[in-house]
Amino acid sequence: MGKGGQRAHENAAQPKVWKSSYDPLSKNAPKLPTKGEIKAAIPAHCFVRSGFKSMMYVVRDSIMAAAMVYATSQVLTTDLPTSASEALVFVFGWSFYAFWMGSILTGHWVLAHECGHGAFSPSQDFNDFIGFILHQALLVPYYAWQYTHAKHHRRTNHLNDGESHVPSTKEDNGLGENLERNTFYAVWHEAMGDGAFAAFQIWSHLFLGWPLYLLGLASTGRLDVHGKPLDGRISDHFRPSSPMFPEKISFKIALSTAGVVATLGFLGYLMYTVGVVPVICWYWGPYTITNAWLVLYTWLQHTDPSIPHYGEGEWTWVRGALSTIDRDYGIFDFFHHRIGSTHVLHHLFHECPFYNAWEATQAVKAFLEPKGLYNYDPTPWPVAMWRIARTCHYVEDTTGIQYLKSLEDVPLSKDLKEKSS
């Protein structure tokens, strides 16, 4: 494949890919139902929350985590290898542990996420108590994330006032008015080539995305808490004075930050007393995988070339919520409480507990699918991830109704120069 935008096959030779059936720009676009009409299609018992039942899942996931630690302790050592065979066992063994332990701990992450939404139990005090413990152990500033994630739900796929995975514009990516590749990603893409740039997109999203987001350096919204443009201000999750937070929750933000600092302090103490390598093997490896999973879910559930994003005047809550995609994650649905395969329902009614979400999803699907309003992509998630990494890079601007475009469709600099000469 050529660099920076040349296709390997003609469109006719490309495999058929999933496409959302709802196009708000079409003259035949269906009238959207109200939130109340959608909720009426869901059995009332799906919204009943049980703190006891939720805690049983915390216990279940914790037992799996403990079993993983015990089993690993019986077959692996954190002593640095002294031979090639030991190095092979060390690398593959601890990589195996990191992946599966990180996948198990993503279940804890999802349960804390339920707490933040108020779906864990009828008591928000209990929810916050459990959610704070689970999230702080994974270095998540619970109250700060709770606030910004609520905004992500309130303003889903809003080009100006959205939160997390807000699409960057043509200008943000370094493209000129006539698609000149001036700076940043546009230049990098041309230099790297299509495949390498897609691989870089996946790596940067999964392994850098979460910490950069918490630090306010990537994927944040464009407006502060007062609706004013950030204009270069850092909207991190740690300062009570961060422009994304109202003053009334300053104490909660400080408490979350203190929890993260305390956890980091404890990890630092362990690194000093037990050793750097053991802490990396036992904690930081799984931590990285857990972060990768949570970014992957948010990325894939809201991103596709056929999913619209809305500017001011076009966005409505229902439009935003229905711009969500359900996907099948196979065995990981078990570990992650179906967060990816019931995401449409979750964005419509985040108060619905995860253990009722599958039944509620079937009801929502039965109501929305005949109207062409339910998004389910059957593409295997690794294939979908690769496709999105290649096709979803930028939008033209933040007005009207926008669809994500690919840098692969932007002419190479030399071709643009030849065309203009």
Image (cartoon, rainbow, N blue to C red):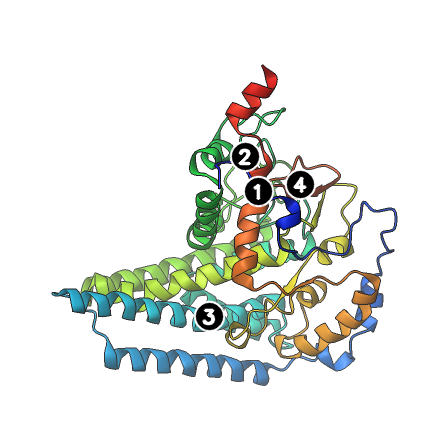
Q: Which residue is nearer to you in this view: 18 or 298?
A: 18
Q: Is residue 353 above or below residue 237?
A: below
Amino acid type, residue under disc 2 in the picture: Asn
Report which residue position mark 3 lands on: 134
Side of 9 where 62 appears, left or right: left
Q: Is residue 92 above or below residue 211?
A: below
Sequence-wise first label, 1 or 4: 4
Q: Which residue is nearer to you in this view: 92 or 379?
A: 379
Position in image of residue 157 (x %, y %): 67, 50
Residue 238 visible here: no
Position in image of residue 28 (x %, y %): 88, 51
Q: Which residue is nearer to you in this view: 401 or 36?
A: 401
Secondary structure of residue under mark 3: helix
Residue positioned 47% across, 66% down in the render: 135
Mark 1 closeness class: few <14, some 14–19, many ≥20 residues within 10 Å:
many
Label 1 and label 4: CA atoms lie apart by 25 Å
Label 3 and label 2: CA atoms lie apart by 36 Å
Which mark identifies residue 173? 2
Sequence-wise first label, 4 or 2: 2
Side of 76 where 184 appears, left or right: right
Sequence-wise first label, 4 or 3: 3
Q: Select label 3 or label 2 by which is in front.
A: 2
Amino acid type, residue under disc 3 in the picture: Leu
